Image: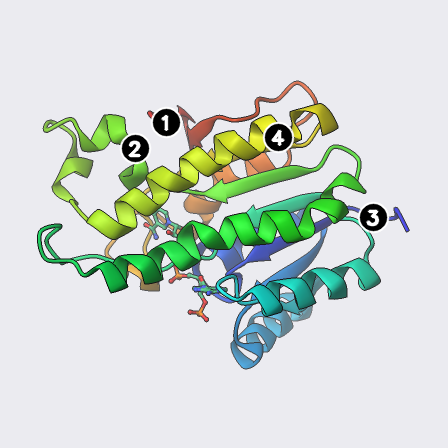
Amino acid sequence: MQEGKTALVTGANKGIGREIARQLAEKGYTVWMGCRDAARGRTAVDALVAAGLDVRLLEIDVASDPSVTAAADALGREAGHLNVLVNNAGVPGFGTSPLEESIANIKDIYEVNVFGPIRVTQAFQHLLKAAASARIVNVSSGLGSLGLMSDPASAYSKFNNLGYNSSKTALNGVTVAFANAFRSSGIKVNAADPGYVATDLNGHSGPRTVAQGATPVVRLATLDESGPTGQFFEEFGAQAW
Ligand SMILES: NC(=O)c1ccc[n+]([C@@H]2O[C@H](COP(=O)([O-])OP(=O)(O)OC[C@H]3O[C@@H](n4cnc5c(N)ncnc54)[C@H](OP(=O)(O)O)[C@@H]3O)[C@@H](O)[C@H]2O)c1
């Protein structure tokens, strides 16, 4: 069942994820828009279908083992292979001092931002291995960069969120671990920093557009054979770990 190129984007009903789905569909991929809420997902899918794009709804809550398993089964039946996985779904955690943020809150953030990509990548690995030269992109953040966060001269270091920032640092570690694990099967795994993008995640405070934010993600999702693996990029080049 190895026909057209397929992609799954988690958290695709809005924000950067919806734009990643749109850009991949414009490049000719059949894109499954992973959404945890069927009604919100249907609205997003219908809008892109109306624009002539080949996108489909896949219900998936990345924080739930049964949901992720059911989604992998459904995609296996419908497509049989997966060329691109974008682990985009994420939740924020801003505005509380690291000295006050509760463990419960940090665990909730990690469940989506760290365990979500692990859970999804593990559950879909057989479909990725069934595709030629699959690509995985983990949507990280400059706030997960230890280099930037530990530099008092960097604007990033002013956004000192314990749970969110360290969840993205952990996701960078997950990216390297999966890159090494998939290296022999030719699957490339990289992390992308979209930059500071105006979305619901930050109350639309970012200066960048979703189109700009999606750009480094789509580039890494469509790398050719000479492309890197186990690396971290923003739009204009390598991002500091
Ligand atoms: N915006 C920025 O400046 C920025 C910068 C760096 C990195 N990022 C990262 O970019 C990614 C996308 O963020 P965004 O800015 O586009 O935020 P957003 O507009 O708030 O979108 C987040 C998406 O994730 C989904 N989601 C949350 N929890 C989920 C779960 N358990 N299962 C499935 N989907 C779930 C949301 O679904 P619902 O609508 O159902 O909640 C929504 O579709 C995130 O990983 C974020 O950390 C954003």
Q: Of callouts 1 and 4, which one flags the residue occurring earlier in the amino acid sequence?
A: 4
The three-letter amino acid code for the residue at tag 2 is Ser
Residue 107, how many percent across, how many down? Answer: 32, 59
Snapshot quadrant of residue 71 = bottom right
Residue at left offset 19%, top offset 49%: 161
Secondary structure state at the residue bearing disc 1: loop
Mark 1 → mark 4, Cα distance in angstroms: 22 Å
> Toward which corner of the image does residue 232 lie, by quadrant?
top left
Q: Earlier in the sequence, mark 2 or mark 1?
A: 2
Q: Is residue 170 visible?
A: yes
Indicate the amino acid at tag 3.
Answer: Gly
Which residue is denoted by mark 2 in the rendering?
145
Residue 188, image x, y percentages: 62, 30
**Where residue 239 is drawn, which disc sits there?**
1
- For this rendering, which residue is in front, 24 or 64? 64
Asked if residue 3 is positioned above or below residue 56 in the image, the reply reads above
Circle 2 — which element? loop
User: Spatial distance from mark 2 to mark 4, Cα to Cα?
Assistant: 22 Å
Residue lying at 70% horizontally and 22% vertically, measured from the top left: 225
Q: CA distance from mark 2 to mark 3?
A: 36 Å
Cα distance in 3D space between marks 3 and 4: 26 Å
- Who comes first in sequence, dot 3 or dot 4? 3
Residue bearing the label numbered 4: 181
State left or right for residue 196 relative to residue 10.
left
Q: Is mark 2 within 8 Å of ligand 1?
A: no
Whichever of labels 2 and 3 marks the residue nearer the N terminus, that label is 3
Residue 4, numbered label: 3
